[in-house]
Amino acid sequence: MKADLGVTDAQMGLLQGLAFAICYTTFGLVLGFVTDRTDRRLLLALSIFVWSAATIAGGFTKSFEMLFVTRVFVGLGEAGVLPIAGSLIADYLPPKSRAKAFGMLLLGGTFGTALGFQVGGYAVSLAAMVRDVAPPFIAVLHDWQIAFLVVGVPGVVVAAAFALTVREPVRREKAKIDNKSLKPLVDHIGKNKLAYAALLCSAALNVLCIYAQITWGPTFFVRAYGWAPEQTANFLAISSIIGATSAPSVGWLMSWLLGKGRSDAPLIVALIHAACLIVLGPLGYLSPVIWLTAPFYLLMSFTSNWSTSAALMGVSQVTPNEMRGQLTAFYTLLSGLISLSLGAYAVGMLSDTVFTQANGIRYSMALVYLIAGGLSLSLIVIGRSAFRASVQRAQAWAEPE
C-alpha cells in the first residue's frame, strides 16, 4: 500500500487511525442518541451495510485522499456497533448474565482480526484466485485492493440477515426520566463524573495499546526480526486465536468478582489489564530475540478484550436504560480520539521522528505502552471509590424487573 499510494508511516497511521476515528467518534454520539429512542436492530443492520460498502469502495481507491474518505465512512458505519449492541445485550439479559455476554460480543472482532491478518498475509495468492474468476475491472486491481473487496462483500449479506432474523427486546431498568433532551444526560454525567472518568478513560487508554498492537504488530515482526509476510501472518493468526480466549475469560472473571460482592469488578479488570500492558509491553517489544518476545506478545493478546468488556459492563451498572446508548457512544468517542487515533499515529510518528533506526519501531511501541498504561493505572486508583458509590446510587432504579 505504501508503494502504490506513495505514503509514509505516519500517513499509514492516519489511514488506520484518524480517518476511521473522524466519524467513529463524532457520529457515534448521534447514533447513541438514536439508539436510546428507536428500533436498535434495524439501526445496527444499517450500520453493518454502511461500513461494508465503504470497505468495498476502498478497494477501488487510487490515492491517499480517496482511501482516507472511504475510511471515514467505515468509521461512520462502525460507530453504532458498541452503543447498539451494548444496549441490546443489557435488555436481552439480566444483570448477572451480562458480563459474560459482553465478553462474548467481542469475539467477533477477535475472529475478524485473525481473518484480516490471514487475508493480508496471503494477499498475493488470494488475489490470484480472485482474478481467475473476476471481471476485468477487478482483475486489474492491486493485491491489497482485492483484499478489501473480499472482506467487504460478506458484510452486505450479514446486514440483511441481521435485519430479518433479530428481534427488538423490551427495554428494561428505566429510570423514568425525560429523554427528549440532553439535560438529564448532562446532569447524570455530572453527578458521576469521576466514576465515568475512571471507567471509560482508563479503558480507552488500555485499548490504545491494543490498537497499536493490531496496527503495527505485522510491521514490528518484519522490521525487528526480518520475518516474511506469510510468517508474520501465521504468528498473528495464532495470537488472534489466543485473543479469542480473552472474551470468555474476562466475562468469567467479572462474573466471579461480582459474585464475590465486588461492585467495582469492571475497574479491577481494567486495572489488571493496565498492569499487564505496562510490564509485558516493554518486555516483549524490547526483547532482542523472538523466543522471548513471542510469549509476552501472546499474553498481551490474551487480555486484549478485557478493557472494552469492562467498559460495557460498567456502563450497564451505573447508567439508566434511557442513556446507555449515549454513554456507550461516549466511550466510542474516547476510544476513537484516544485509542484509535493516538494508538496508530503515535507509533508511526515516533518511528518517523525519534526512533528512526531500522528496528526503531520496538522502542516506539514500548514507550507508548508505558505512557498509556501508566495513565490508565493512575485513573483507576483515583476513581475506584467514586465508581463504587455510583453503583450504590444506581441500585434504586437498576433492580431487574
Image: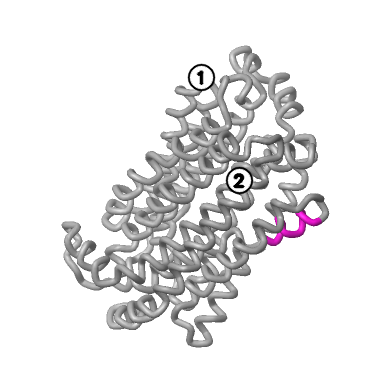
Q: Is residue 14 left or right of residue 324?
A: right
Q: Secondary structure at mark 2?
A: helix
In the displayed structure, 102 sits above or below 13; it is below
Look at the image and say whether residue 359 sits in the magenta stretch. no
Q: Is residue 301 left or right of residue 234?
A: left
Q: Which residue is painted at 78% across and 36% down in the image?
A: 230
- Residue that label 2 marks: 364
Q: Is residue 266 left or right of residue 83?
A: right
111 and 375: which is toward the camera: 375
As shown in the figure, which amino acid type bears the numbered disc 2? Ser
Measured Cα–Cα span from mark 2 to mark 1 = 27 Å
Viewport quadrant of the C terminus = bottom left
Q: Does the CB distance between marks 2 and 1 fall below 8 Å?
A: no
Q: Which residue is painted at 45% across and 54% down in the image?
A: 166
Residue 277 location, x and y as percent? 60, 61
349 and 141: which is toward the camera: 349
In the displayed structure, 57 sits above or below 265; it is above
Mark 2 neighbour density, 10 Å: few (under 14) some (14–19) many (20 or more)? many
Viewport quadrant of the N terminus = top right
Q: Which mark is residue 63?
A: 1
As shown in the figure, which amino acid type bears the numbered disc 1? Ser
160 and 365: which is toward the camera: 365
Q: Which residue is painted at 59% across and 14% down in the image?
A: 137
**Dominant SS type (magenta):** helix
Residue 50 location, x and y as percent? 43, 37
